[in-house]
Amino acid sequence: MEDLNSRYGLNQAHSEVVQACAVITPCDALDMGCSSGRNALYLSQRGFRVTAVDANPQAIATLQSIVDQEGIQTIAPQVYDIQQADIGADYGFIACTVTLMFIDPSRVGAVLADMQQRTLPGGYNLIVCAMDTAEYPCPMNFPFTLKPGELSAQYQGWDLVKYNEDLGTMHNGAQLQFATMLARKP
């Protein structure tokens, strides 16, 4: 299978999205904060039907151009600000990787609640988000960061397939702690 991400100069799919595909059967998926579509393209090539949303019209235009050039029927790019917390459809898999930290902190609870409500029973949420902790103060000036245990607490009653709060490296080389979670809705 040809790697469309390299063909179009995009970064590879997020490693957690790649790992989640080992667990999740292809289904209707939502890529929240898709940027130019690195995760959406990866998921599409693995049989998922992907709605890819981002608040940046340029990013969506880039992804739409790739979709058009490749004749991809399984990606629907849409300009959408996830802070609205009104997804409007149900999904078997919702991925939100390195996106929450760019939104208004007062909207995070509503966004997570909407994600949970719009996940089908037995479906999955994947979240990777920066943290700000005493041991590892966040070096980036993100509008929002998670505190220890905050993300897992939001998913009480879900099966945490994977959960950690490990150190990671941003693409710019900054070291910071990330909360990484793949949770299955009962």
Image (cartoon, rainbow, N blue to C red):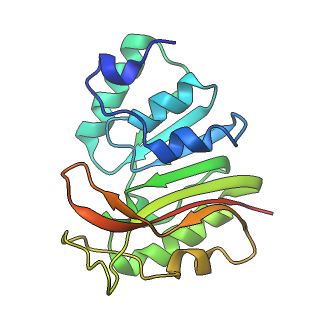
State whether residue 12 appears in this view: yes
Toward the bottom, the furthest residue is 134
What percent of the width, then of the height, locates residue 38?
39, 34
What percent of the width, then of the height, locates residue 63?
35, 29
Question: Is 156 positioned to the left or the right of 58 in the image?
Answer: right
Question: Is 19 positioned to the left or the right of 69 in the image?
Answer: right
Question: Would you identify the image quadrant in which residue 107 lies?
Answer: bottom left
Question: Would you identify the image quadrant in which residue 47 lies?
Answer: top right
Question: Is 167 positioned to the left or the right of 181 in the image?
Answer: left
State whether residue 74 appears in this view: no
Eyeballing the image, is 148 above or below 180?
below
What percent of the width, then of the height, locates residue 61?
29, 31
* Residue drawn where x is 49% and y is 65% of the image: 85
* Residue drawn where x is 37% and y is 73% of the image: 131
Eyeballing the image, is 134 above or below 122?
below
The number of numbered badges drawn on the structure is 0
* Residue drawn where x is 58% and y is 62% of the image: 115
Camera-nearest residue between 11 and 119: 11
